[in-house]
Amino acid sequence: MTPPSKSLSLFREEDLQPAEEAVYTSGRHAKSAHQDRPDSLPARASSLWLCLEFPHLCLEIYGDTFSARQPLAVVEDSGTRSRLQACNPRATALGVRPQMTLNAALALAPDLLILNRNKEKEQQLLERLAIWAGQYTALVSLELPNALLLEVRGSLRLFGGLRKLSRRIRDGLIELGYRVRWACAPTPLASLWLARATDGAVISEIHQLPGALGRVPLACLGWPQERLNILRQMGVNVVADCLRLPRDGFARRLGSSWLEMLDRAMCRLPDPRRAFEPPVDFKSEIQLPYEVHETAVLLPVLECMLKELQGVLLARQAGIQRLTFCFCHLDNPATCLKLDLVSLSRSAKHFMTLLELKLETVRLPSPVTALRMQSEPLRPLQASTAGLFSKVDPGDNGSEMPFLVERLRVRLGTDAVHGIGMIPEHRPEAAWRFVEPGTETKTWYFRPRPLWMLLEPQRLPEREGLPCFDGQLILESGPERIESGWWDGKDVTRDYFVARHPGGRRFWLFRERRGGGEWFLHGAFG
Amino acid sequence: MKEVLKKLLKNPGIWRGGETYIEQSAVPTGYPELDAALPARGWPPRALTEILLEQNGVGELRLLMPALAAMTRDENTPVAWIVWIAPPYIPYAPALVEWGIKLSRVLLVHPKKPGEGIWAMEQALRSGTCAAVLAWIEHVDERHQRRLQLAAEEGACWGILFRSMKYRTQTSTAALRMCVLPHKDSLQVEIIKCRGGRPGKLAAINHRTLGTGVFS
């Protein structure tokens, strides 16, 4: 049996050479392409994919478990045995490893905290991260179970190059508390495989693909175990070995879908990806790995949730005005806190300040087991431009006064802070109303009117035909007759006077024209 | 020698008894009698003013109105709010408009618990977005007053504290303290303390000049 000739091999030998060489050879062989092989490589990649892989996603749905002092592990039931999917560094230090059976792990670390794998929550978290990543590119695609694919070619110029962009994304994720592996490549699959094999690998041109992917172990491809076993028995361990195999034999033995996958990774077949479509509102939930008594411990977790929210709002060019937090307890109904903002905002710092104020006024009835955050539907908010000379908080919408109103409202209650407005009405008690702070109302006035008004007119006793209040009052001017309001049943017929107190104070009072003609105090010229 | 002396006299810590210190940015009160009694010829705009009253409604608001109206209309400060904390009655909107106050710049705060009034006042003073903060708070100890005074300086805001006459003898860090007493035809203002001037001056403002439209 002769060794497989070049024409039969899956890919050309040159493809496996270092990049520079491949450029020169590909042109020479282009015309002699074989019928069973898809079109030869395009000269330049039109897209660039950044893959973000979250190796510890199943742990991270439980919040920041990495710095926890307790050894933690996530377990998945597979048939009869429970196997560990992931564990935190504390557990690793005790000798616990992923893929161990539960019994073995417990033998090594008796106080290991076992958490169940929750694939649904993992997908929700991945979707939230996809929304967050939307601030860097328009095309984010989910790669279940634990990776995101970002098409970043169009974003490079805006964010100052791939190096800056990737660092920004990575640092942002680390700040949010996620462990991430990443890689860049012209095809989505290549970037995914590279991220699993070499964290931080960057391949920007298609001709570099075979060389870079060739070194990737087959275990990083995420293929089913039995397929990998077949290949291993054939002595095929890395992608390069795979590419040397004859195409038809490879398809026959392993299935054509895997061949297609290789072709897609090598950019020989198109690999369109569906962009993730974000929902209209934002929800987030963190299951705490243990019960928390102190609000101070919750604050960093809440801050992470809010930063994530800010990223999402930035990505969607949206803002929110209402935000609900639920603190779930084991034995009590959840404590819910509502944040009401005066105007749309997207600043995590802003939300956090208000939330801290709110938390000061609340006592949690029992320890907290989970945190839930739910926003109202996102509403479009015009982006603010960053200052030319100063660094502006990206979420800040620049207006200070609503912030004061919010601070006061959060601490004192929404009904304790008002603006004041006017209503075109003759009846003095109906001529004003509380309004939202800052609301413009049409002004309308008569003279004279007092600066202080009583909420309810106060009845005054009468002596010698004149009203008394702390002494007999002297009428200075009037009457001003007000007769109005027959349409709503609160009609008035009154004569208003300005009266002087012997001590020098001025009051505004009226005499009821119906009934016994009683006197009432209605205001003071404060 | 004279140069050295001049330099020395520029030190803000030195105050010579014979001269009155005039703050450039004082806000005219709108009443010449009162302006004459105040060393800065107006309200101190970035400090705490304390007004002591026997009763509410003697004319204390009318004293402030011209200055407040000027502040809300000032074009240089686009957002100049006037915050009312725990007012004893309702500030009546039509009368405020009549005095020239922009209603959309008025914020009313009604705290429910005793300590919240001072907290709210400090927040408003410090925010830097308010032109004036009027508060009716009875129990303000010296420590709180100092905090309020600092907040007013920091936020460049005029803080006005209305309190009962019984606190007259209490020490205070306010830049200006005055008693306001109504008389038959006039409003008596007695300056108890003022920064950069001598206390004890009296001003009588005729009710006719106080306005309100009573005599119109």
Image (cartoon, coloured by chain):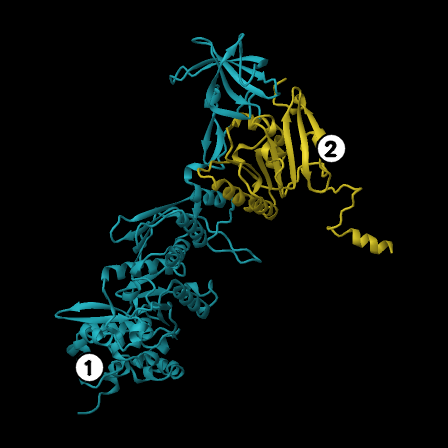
- Chain of the residue where label 1 is placed in the rendered structure: A
Kind of residue sitting beneath label 2: Ala
Quadrant in the rendering for residue A207: bottom left
Image quarter of the C terminus of chain A: top right
Instruction: Compute the Cα span from label 2 to label 1.
Output: 100 Å
Compare residues A195 and A507 and report the one nearer the observer.
Answer: A507
Task: Name the colour assigned to chain A in the rendering.
Answer: cyan
Q: Position of residue A168 (x, y in %)?
A: 44, 66
Disc assigned to residue A273: none
- Label 2 sits on residue: B36
Q: Position of residue A376 (x, y in %)?
A: 34, 46
Disc assigned to residue A231: 1
**In front: mark 2 or mark 1?**
2
Compare residues A515 and A387 and report the one nearer the observer.
Answer: A515
How many badges with numbers are in the image? 2
Task: Name the colour assigned to chain B in the rendering.
Answer: yellow
Compare residues B104 and A43 and report the one nearer the observer.
Answer: B104
Secondary structure beneath dot 2 equals helix
> Is residue A379 something that shows in the picture?
yes
Neighbour tally class for label 1: few under 14, some 14-19, many 20 plus, Cα within 10 Å: some
- Chain of the residue where label 2 is placed in the rendered structure: B
